[in-house]
Amino acid sequence: LELSNKINIPMQQIETDDSICLLVTSSGLQIIAPAISKKPFELNLTKLISEFQKQQEIKKHPLSMAIGLKKKKCLIYDMTAGFIKDSCLLAYLGHKVVAIEKNPVIYEIAKSAQEKIKDTSPKLDLSIVNADSINFINKHQKPDIILIDPMFPKDKKTALVKKPMQILQAI
């Protein structure tokens, strides 16, 4: 009920229509989007970090290459955080990252996923903020790097984007 009030979405029973629902479970927050997938979606940062650890050439990731391999720890603002995959990658590479997400539902999903990994190794210097990114940057320390990864309008191609991106677009 507290979460329902915080993000201004009423609690209700799950119905069988195509509405997107936020489900609170013992393992965290899940999104049910029947029009996109029959299975609930849960943001799993533990799996993501594990994938980073398995990749021996993570520094050759396109995002790593785009920001440059700086020897110093940078302060990075991810202005369009979404499901914080890019933020996690940059924090995993040793940077201090502030992930800024305006949508309260997406913020709560990302925050819930972050809570589950906060006591794991490696420690990520990652904070998630629910705010308008322009207002945030005007009120806080100027970062070394600003990351903006906008969602593009739906393409007319026939191939579907991956499920997490479909869910972000739907929300």
Image (cartoon, grey):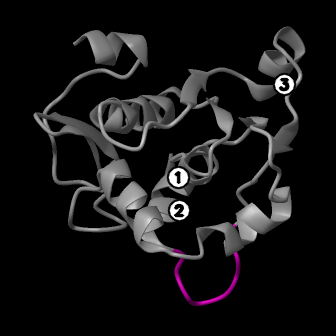
Residue visible at 47% across and 64% down? 52
Amino acid type, mark 2 = Met
Q: Which residue is mark 2?
A: 165
Q: Residues within 10 Å of mark 2 (few under 14, many from 20)?
A: some
Residue visible at 83% across and 56% down? 67
> Camera-side residue: 142 or 2?
142
Task: Report the side of 148 relative to 51 (left or right).
Answer: right
Indicate which disc residue 134 carries: 3
Residue numbers of the magenta segment? 154-161
Task: Tell me which corner region of the image, top left, top right, bottom left or bottom right, holds residue 2.
Answer: top left
Residue 162 on the magenta segment:
no
Residue 142 rendering spot, x and y as whole percentages: 89, 22
Indicate which disc residue 168 carries: 1
Q: Secondary structure at mark 3?
A: helix
Q: Residues within 10 Å of mark 3 (few under 14, many from 20)?
A: few
Task: Tell me which corner region of the image, top left, top right, bottom left or bottom right, holds residue 61.
Answer: bottom right
